[in-house]
Amino acid sequence: MILNIIYVLLFICIVYYVYRCYATVNTEGFEPCHACSKKLPCQCNKFNKFNKELIKVWVSHLLYTRLVCMAFLTDDRSLSSLVDRLLQNQKDIGKIMENKYGSEVGKTITDALVKHITIATAVLTAVKSNNKVEQIKSIDEFYSNANDIGIYLDKLLHVTKFTHHMKIHIKSLVDDVLAFKNYNYQGDIQKLDIYVDAGLDMVFDMI
């Protein structure tokens, strides 16, 4: 019951945070939209649809990743359903990227993200069992996979931001998982704030 309440409160907080960030964006200093030539954020349906869909699935990614971690470490009965939902989220992200950048991009991102979740499961297993050797090994693999995703996104979007974004994404998640596992709930909340902020910074750099 307590875990369910935490789920609801966490979801409300993330949605409200995104709304406040996105709703207060102004047009000063923005480049023209390629679709309608108006300054971003514009009213162009093509531009807004991608932004809204990407923000929605990325918030879902942050939310369900956190819920899976909590359920895994506490043996919550919702774990299987949450894992299924998180894996679907990876496919949803790939589909949105496919709609904008093509099927090859969508498949590449989906495959990388599904692998991302598989590695995350190994990290959680090692943390839960206090297996330090496997923990170090799986976390290193986690960073490597994240770096590959970051390099791919940098190349796709012609920027040099996402290798850094992915590194911070992994670090903040691992730090949060370790705090939660060690019953450091005050530290857990602080690390969770960092994780959410870093995740939102990343998606805002994609739109």
Image (spheres, rainbow, N blue to C red):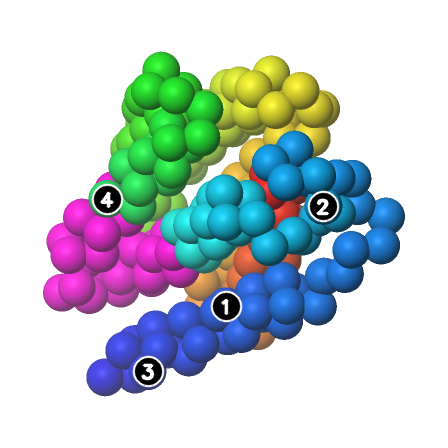
Task: Tell me if 29 is positioned left or right of 99 in this view.
Answer: right
Q: Compute the Cα span from label 1 to label 4.
A: 20 Å
Q: Which residues are magenta?
A: 60-87
- What residue is shown with label 1? 14
Tell me the residue at 50%/43% (across/down).
46
Foreground mark, 1 or 3, reads: 1
Count residues near mark 2 (Cα–Cα under 10 Å), then give few for <14, some for 14-19, many for 20+: some
Q: Secondary structure at mark 1?
A: helix
- What residue is shown with label 4? 88
Count residues near mark 4 (Cα–Cα under 10 Å), then give few for <14, some for 14-19, many for 20+: some
- What residue is shown with label 2? 38
- What residue is shown with label 3? 5
Looking at the image, can residue 122 be seen?
A: no
Q: Secondary structure at mark 3?
A: helix
- Of label 3 and label 2, which has the lower sequence position? 3
What amino acid is at disc 3? Answer: Ile
> As displayed, is residue 183 above or below residue 144?
below
What amino acid is at disc 2? Answer: Lys
Q: Compute the Cα span from label 4 to label 3.
A: 23 Å
Q: Are circles 4 and 2 on residues that touch, CB within 8 Å?
A: no
Queried whether the magenta region covers residue 81, the answer comes back as: yes
- Of label 4 and label 3, which has the lower sequence position? 3
What amino acid is at disc 1? Answer: Ile
Q: Are circles 2 and 1 on residues that touch, CB within 8 Å?
A: no
Q: Secondary structure at mark 2?
A: loop
